[in-house]
Image (spheres, rainbow, N blue to C red):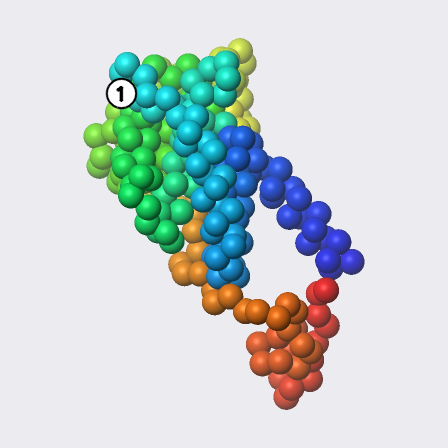
Amino acid sequence: MASAGLAGGSAGIALTLLRFAALTGVAVLHLRLYEETGDLTCLDVAGRALRHDTARLTALPDGTLTLFDGTAHLPYLHGGSAGLAYAVRDFLTHRPEPDLAPLPEALRRTCDPVHVHNCGLLRGRAGSIATLAALGEGPDSPAVLRQVRRLAWHARTHRGNLAFPGFRLLRLSSDLATGAAGILLALGRVFDGTGPVLPFLDPRPSPRPHREGGERRVGDPGAAGAGRGGDPGPLAV
């Protein structure tokens, strides 16, 4: 039962991460696995996945760097270059590679465009704000402050409260992906340092050492569920 629950949860995580871009989600997933296990094979997979998507980056005349999906140039957290920025940032902390080193700065500049049609987290201005914070821009950053002020272009009032329109600006939304909840998370991330705007986007402090030989044996020091006095507790298998 424990292993089934873990497998189901991992599948859901993978599906969520895959939405960042064709293979950027795969890279994020394997970066987190590397940080959990220290297995360099996971880092290798992350690097190959990243290079698949960095090859699709396109420099536009205004200097922005967007991810081309075959039909459109996407700067967003969902499926675009902002989502790619998280994976590139984390990969470079573990394996500095000269050809990827300029990308975080170029992607940071891409998060400061004047025109963003939507205001939400996954495909709008709030995602740009969250990504600027993830790339080291603080609450006094001119780029952050410009984007926060531009949220006023989208702001509305509803029954006396602040509200924002959702995707394509068709109706007011309070949800995480397109509306006020996602905007609140992005603002909290940059002004209060409240953590990642989505699970698994921030790296672990340091990778755990890789351990060969598969599962831990019952009774090993540090084995999952080991009780006091050497009595092993239940193990998830």
Q: Mark 1 points at which residue?
A: 63
Q: Is mark 1 on a helix, strand or loop?
A: loop
x and y, in percent, of residue 89 in the image: 36, 43
104 in relation to 4, above or below: above
Q: Give the number of callouts.
A: 1
At label 1, the amino acid type is Gly
35 in relation to 162, above or below: below
For this view, does 7 lie left or right of residue 165? right
Q: Based on the displayed image, in which of its 4 quarters is residue 62 positioned?
A: top left
x and y, in percent, of residue 50 in the image: 45, 38
203 in relation to 187, above or below: below
Q: Based on the displayed image, in which of its 4 quarters is residue 144 positioned?
A: top left
Label 1 Cα crowd, 10 Å radius (few <14 / some 14-19 / many 20+): few
x and y, in percent, of residue 57 in the image: 39, 26
Residue 224 in view: no
For this view, does 145 lie left or right of residue 58? left
Q: Which residue is drawn at 63% across and 88% down?
A: 229
Decide which of 60, 48 is in the foreground and name it.
48
Residue 82 in view: yes
Decide which of 86, 94 is in the foreground and name it.
94
Decide which of 157, 184 is in the foreground and name it.
184
Q: Quadrant of the C terminus?
A: bottom right
x and y, in percent, of residue 216 in the image: 64, 73
Q: Residue at x 21, y 30 (%)?
A: 142
Q: Residue at x 47, y 33 (%)?
A: 52
